[in-house]
Each structure stands twice: as C-alpha cells, then as structure tokens.
Image (cartoon, rainbow, N blue to C red):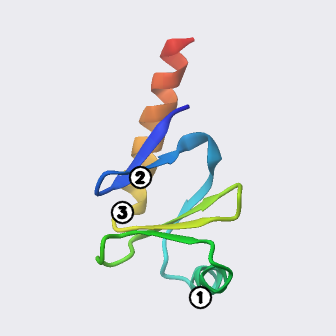
Amino acid sequence: MKLINVGFGNLVSGSRVIAIVSPDSAPIKRIIQEAKEQGMVIDATCGRRTRSVIVTDSDHIILSAIQTETIAGRAELSRDEGDKDE
C-alpha cells in the first residue's frame, strides 16, 4: 500500500484515490457541501485554506491545504516507487 502525504502529517492510501481536483469550481463546492451533510468529509487542512480536494473510491472527500499539482506529483512518485518494488 502506497501512502500519499496530503500535508501536516496526514496520509492517504494512493490506491483509494480517484481524483485530485481544485476546490474553486461550483460543482466541486457542491460535492463538498453534500459530503459534509452526509458526514463524508475529512478535513486535513489544519485550519488553513483548502487548496485541493481528494475524491476516494469510498465516496469520502478529503480537503487539503496543499496545492493540487503538489499532491499529484507526490502520487506519481509513490506510484513510480511501487513499480521499482516489483
């Protein structure tokens, strides 16, 4: 299992991530609000501004204060390291 650092010591299983998106668009804001109402939001921002939203295969929404591109780069590194282990 490869873990992705989403900031402030918080890690997410890379195999469970479906998408990493920016929180700026109206549809994403709506998804966040609906997930909050259902209790499916994990806030990993530590009180800072949300800069990326991670969607998982369990329909959980993870909020992060790290830029979308940074998390995507970490996910790519995690995947590349997994290829070396095989």
User: For mark 3, what is the residue?
Assistant: 67
Residue 75, above or below 6: above
Q: Position of residue 19 (x, y in %)?
A: 61, 57
Query: Circle 1 sits on which residue?
Result: 26
In the image, is residue 12 above or below residue 24?
above
Instruction: Assign a secondary structure to mark 3.
Output: loop
Tell me which amino acid carries mark 3: Gln
- The image shows residue 42 at horizontal and vertical percentages of 51, 68
Where does the image place residue 48, in percent across and percent down from the top left?
Answer: 29, 76
**Quadrant in the rendering for residue 67:** bottom left
Q: What residue is pinned by disc 2?
A: 71
Residue appearing at x 58%, y 80% in the figure:
32
Q: Are marks 3 and 2 in contact (CB under 8 Å)?
A: yes
Looking at the image, which residue sits at the far top?
86
Q: Amino acid at mark 2?
A: Ile
Q: Residue furthest front?
A: 39
